[in-house]
Amino acid sequence: MQNCSPEEVRSILDKIEQLPVPFFKRLIEASNTGIIISDASLPDNPVAYVNPAFERMTGYALYEVVGRNCRFLQRDDRDQPGIALIRHAVEHAEISTALLRNYRKDGSLFWSRMHLFPVREDGAAPTHFVAFLQDVTEVVEAQHAVVQARERLSTVLESVSDGCFSVDRDWRITYINARGADAIGRRPEDLIGKHLWKEFPEAVGGPFYQTYKRAMDEHEFATCESYYEPLGMWIEVRAYPSREGLTVFYADVTERKEGEQRLMHLATHDSLTGLHNRFSCLRTLDDALARSVEEEHPVGVLFVDLDHFKEVNDAHGHRAGDTVLQEIGRRLGALARAGVTVARISGDEFVFVLEEMDTEGAKAIASAVLQELATPIPVDGQHVAVGASIGIAIGSGREYTADELLNNADAAMYEAKDNGRHTFAVFSTHARHLLKQRLELRQEVFSALDRRQFVLFYQPQVSAVNGAVVGAEALLRWEHPRLGLLGPDLFLPMLEGSPAITAVGAWVCEEACRQAREWELLGYRLRMAVNVSPRQLMDENLPPLLKNIVARYGLDAECIKLEVTESMLMQDIDKAALVLSSLQSVGFRIALDDFGTGYSNLSYLRQLPITAIKIDRSFVREIEQDRRCLDIVNGVIAFAKSLKLDVICEGIETELQKEAIRSTGCDVLQGYLIGKPMRASDFRALLLAQRTEPQQADPGCYQPDS
């Protein structure tokens, strides 16, 4: 088999880094290694999470261990060298590996190798400890057998997975197994009888040398893990002293170390751009402000908001938008250096944390950011110019918290937008006034319904068979008297956290049903898709509300499709199931939205009254580059069809995507290629223009008899 080129390897690694976080969570859950995560911010480091492998290994369920210190695994067997190692590692926030005698829930003994490492940011105190737990009972018993029965040494050691060698008290090699010799690129016969340190002089004085010497001198078990430059690998060693000398077991742990580093990177970095994420940004800012109090120097924050970035998505699609964000991330990341941290904290918002930086220094970096963004970015054969509005805030830990300084920079950014965009502004009294205006906007949204400022846009859904419009998704917009048409991302988060979402949700249902009836009178009986908010899904009054609305407009409940997401279901699946079952029993259709982006728990499709699934745009977007995405879509559709579910694919932006999805047996297509969200009048024109005679196909509602 031909080896991959460096470019192909980098490409593969890039794709892995772009996988969604839930993918890596499922990897942790699928691992055969027990994983424990403890909360270092709480007294006694209580357990916060264990994976299924831990449950299988110990017999304890997750709910039985959360909140307890890991010492319960040793019970009363506390006289173990490994416990002291782990205690020292926790006290000093160090990486450590220890061999422990543990006990399962049924009382049976098992030996485990625990590898412990702290999770922290830039030298700060650890927030968590992560331990990898391996059941090494068989290996330990084999090791004891070696010490107790030398005559069986070769047979036993040649069967273990680790490398093994023995030295006498003069450091001459007396034995090495074939696996161990092969790992270091030597032959056993070339090493036996040779002086260890003359064969490996580069190790003298290093961590392995110190570990072996300590075990030999103190006649106690010793272990360490370190990178060995001559072999280019991470090696874990465990040294057992005996009367004759020393027996050492060692293993190549490079793959595990790289996995740990990748896991830590994913927890603190944005998967799309590789920059620090919001969590890491706030932690860095917290630490910088804490140091500013001790060292009496200012800390700066740059809040960078891309100008008109939504237009890139609207004009070129989300895949092109991601490409632009990656290039912007690369350019901004190039400005990072000691004392300058760059983070992406949301879709099109970036933050710079500047240590020991005054206002003039922050302005210089802001100018550099604008210069970097001034160069157009190639997208689909065109060049897209994306500017930025930048807010600057300077302060110290004596004056501000991290949130306050970040909010000040955010307010200054809005002043930059008011000044014409693609410029920067320093936080001032005027910026504070803009911040107050934003707070007022939060209040205005709660009266927008009474002021009749909300409007529904409709995105067409068409039959994959003949292209006829069979449905529409109702999408909420806010026609603000000063700011114009606002998308839901600007105001829905405000509403969803308040009781007002119930009234707005009821209005959306009412208006969508009214519009569906209006189109029905034209001869188009469509299926209207309405997004249900988390609060609505938990409201037992939703079924009678919807039932009354469709009755008032003379609609068939089957023509209303309610879309819910997996994340909503997980909040309280029992209550959600009760509400959805009540809706389904009177004829409403239920669609599982964004299928594939959450836990993708297929049991939902059996447990809940789901009648359709919407395959997320992320699978559609990658079809042209990754054949596996199309295979996944085919598999999901086949499974859905076996359950007699309708399938909708959203996010279709190119003809190639459209044809690929049509080949899968998908029922309904949706996306910018099919049609963007539009006002009701434009949607009506679309219906009238598609044919002289209305024509539809399942799964739209049936046509009334002429």
Image (cartoon, rainbow, N blue to C red):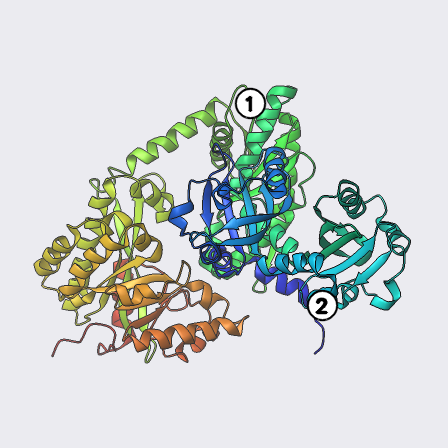
Residue 107 appears at what percent x and percent y?
45, 51
Say which of 592 and 171 sits in front.
Answer: 171
Q: Is residue 526 above or below residue 364?
A: below
Residue 495 appears at what percent x and percent y?
29, 42
Q: Is residue 360 above or below residue 610?
A: above
Q: Is residue 113 above or below residue 637?
A: above
User: Is residue 440 among what the camera can see?
Assistant: yes
Say which of 64 and 295 sits in front.
Answer: 64
Say which of 284 and 354 sits in front.
Answer: 284
Residue 540 appears at what percent x and percent y?
16, 50
Q: Is residue 152 above or below residue 83?
A: below
Residue 163 appears at what percent x and percent y?
73, 61
Residue name at image x 60 percent, y 40 percent: 86
Q: Amino acid at mark 1?
A: Gly
Residue name at image x 30 percent, y 33 percent: 443
User: At numbered mark 2, what does the secondary structure look like: helix, strand or loop?
Assistant: loop
Residue that label 2 marks: 158
Residue name at image x 89 percent, y 56 percent: 199
Instruction: Answer left or right for 290 relative to 217.
Output: left
Q: Which mark is residue 397?
A: 1
Quarter of the picture containing the N terminus is: bottom right
Q: Earlier in the sequence, mark 2 or mark 1?
A: 2
Q: Amino acid at mark 2?
A: Glu
Please tell me in which quadrant of the rendered image residue 647 appears.
Answer: bottom left
Callout 2 crowding tier (Cα within 10 Å): few <14, some 14–19, many ≥20: some
Residue name at image x 70 percent, y 46 percent: 221
Disc 2 to disc 1, C-alpha distance: 60 Å
Callout 1 crowding tier (Cα within 10 Å): few <14, some 14–19, many ≥20: many
Instruction: Answer left or right for 60 relative to 679.
Output: right
